[in-house]
């Protein structure tokens, strides 16, 4: 399997050459500023103690506090969080919000834990990393297998330890304790705005066909938005299977079916395919919204889409992207396509600081403006350097971070 951190470093090396980046700055950006590994003891329901391994990587804070999610997943590793923290640095820079890049994770199958065990793990992780974080230092958020409930526990633990309220230290919180309206759907909403602009640039019509890998928070919300806007969502996959209908799926019906049955496989009048078949079915637009490395050198040549919108973090390996580009496929990278989540997280921090909260319509309008400007800026860099959309996004992001480092004397 491709090492995600090596992929992230490879992407940075390409941008270094395009920008003729100062080599001292490049060396600093090539590795995180800090990464810690922590042991988290949890008393399980059967009375025994298990010790879980967790990480927090802080890549760069030249533009603002480190920012990034916390994931609970069996495949979490030090290299994964290193890569994700680097990508977060570029993501916050590409949408031009005053934050840096961080990421955290715990090696665990969260689905195997009871609610009490999950709470103890969440609080234990916060106890272990509390010296590193703060509203002006490092601001965590939800990620894979974590959610508003987990963030609420972590916020409560942090505030207990410090002895005062600090809602801005964590984003993605429940509304009752300082969360923002529109946060749950923010990643998909931002991706929708980016997809619309990219489709327009490629002259794809409103009834273009779309295949979506992943039916969770990102992929599920996006499927509903696209269906409502008139796109034909022809394939949806979860971890077990792909359902396909060439004339388009009725997304609200599929959504309701998934809620009732817990799976997609028993969908009526749908063709059932293996889970990874979603990547290669006939569709104008492909949306990988699951985990890393979904598109790789062994399957990229089978992709039939004209446009790939990356909602997952790092779903396309460098080898796969080279194949896709050679086949005329446009790839809109994760650092732009899924930046709606961190953008609304930033809005949440702003609201916490003001102690004044916006309507959901306010949040959507501000997000639409941010994402529209970001893809316009990225396309301009793409054309300036005659390169891919990814490298256009990286050129924009890295140049912004490099300028902040120079202005701080970090070169």
Image (cartoon, helix red, strand yellow):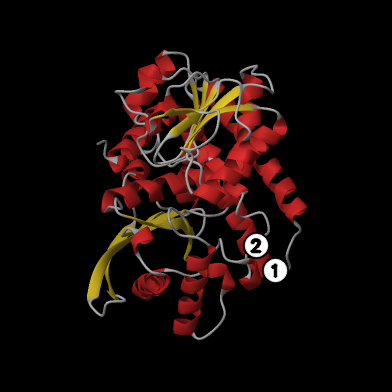
Residue found at x 53% / y 41%: 219
Q: Is residue 361 above or below residue 290?
A: below
Q: If the image is split into quadrants, where does the N terminus sit?
A: top left
For label 2, the SS is helix
Residue found at x 74% / y 46%: 365
Residue found at x 32% / y 38%: 9
**Side (left or right) of 292 relative to 401:** left
Percent position of residue 65, x then y: 49, 60
Outermost residue to the bottom: 163
Name the residue carrying label 2.
350
**Side (left or right) of 199 relative to 140:** right
Residue 400 versus residue 1: which sits nearer the camera?
1
Q: CA distance from mark 2 to mark 1?
A: 6 Å
Badge 2 vs badge 1, beta-carbon distance below 8 Å = yes
- Residue 111 figure quarter: bottom left
Name the residue carrying label 1.
354
**Side (left or right) of 274 relative to 94:** left
Residue found at x 37% / y 40%: 292
For label 1, the SS is helix
Percent position of residue 130, x then y: 40, 73
- Let me know if residue 56 appears in the view: no
- Let me know if residue 154 appears in the view: yes
């Amino acid at each position: 399997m491709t090492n995600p951190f090596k992929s992230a470093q490879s992407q940075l090396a390409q941008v270094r050459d395009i920008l003729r980046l100062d080599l001292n700055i490049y060396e600093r950006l090539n590795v995180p500023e800090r990464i810690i590994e922590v042991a988290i003891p949890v008393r399980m329901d059967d009375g025994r103690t298990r010790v879980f391994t967790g990480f927090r990587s802080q890549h760069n804070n030249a533009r603002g506090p480190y920012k990034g999610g916390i994931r609970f997943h069996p495949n979490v590793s030090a290299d994964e969080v290193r890569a994700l923290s680097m990508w977060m640095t570029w993501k916050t820079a590409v949408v031009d919000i005053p934050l840096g890049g961080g990421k955290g994770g715990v090696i665990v199958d969260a689905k195997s834990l009871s609610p009490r065990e999950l709470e103890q793990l969440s609080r234990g992780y916060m106890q272990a990393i509390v010296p590193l974080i703060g509203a002006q230092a490092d601001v965590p958020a939800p990620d894979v297998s974590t959610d508003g409930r987990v963030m609420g526990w972590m916020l409560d633990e942090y505030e207990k330890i410090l002895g005062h309220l600090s809602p801005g230290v964590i984003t993605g919180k429940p509304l009752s304790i300082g969360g923002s309206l529109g946060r749950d759907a923010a990643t998909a909403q931002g991706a929708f705005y980016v997809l619309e602009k990219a489709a327009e640039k490629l002259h794809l019509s409103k009834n273009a066909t779309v295949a979506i890998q992943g039916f969770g928070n990102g992929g599920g919300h996006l499927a509903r938005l696209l269906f409502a806007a008139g796109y034909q969502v022809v394939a949806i996959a979860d971890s077990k299977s792909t359902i396909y209908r060439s004339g388009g799926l009725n997304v609200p019906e599929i959504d309701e079916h998934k809620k009732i049955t817990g799976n997609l496989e028993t969908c009526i009048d749908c063709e059932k395919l293996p889970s990874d078949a979603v990547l290669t079915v006939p569709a104008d637009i492909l949306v990988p919204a699951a985990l890393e490395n979904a598109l790789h050198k062994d399957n990229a040549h089978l992709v039939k889409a004209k446009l790939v919108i990356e909602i997952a973090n790092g779903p396309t390996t460098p080898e796969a992207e080279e194949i896709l580009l050679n086949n005329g496929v446009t790839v809109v990278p994760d650092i732009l396509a899924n930046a709606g989540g961190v953008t609304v997280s930033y809005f949440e921090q702003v609201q916490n600081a003001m102690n004044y909260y916006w309507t959901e319509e306010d949040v959507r309008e501000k997000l639409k403006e941010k994402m529209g400007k970001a893809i316009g800026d990225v396309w301009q860099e793409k054309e300036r350097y005659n390169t891919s959309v990814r490298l256009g996004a990286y050129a924009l992001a890295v140049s912004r971070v490099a300028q902040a480092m120079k202005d701080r004397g970090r070169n």
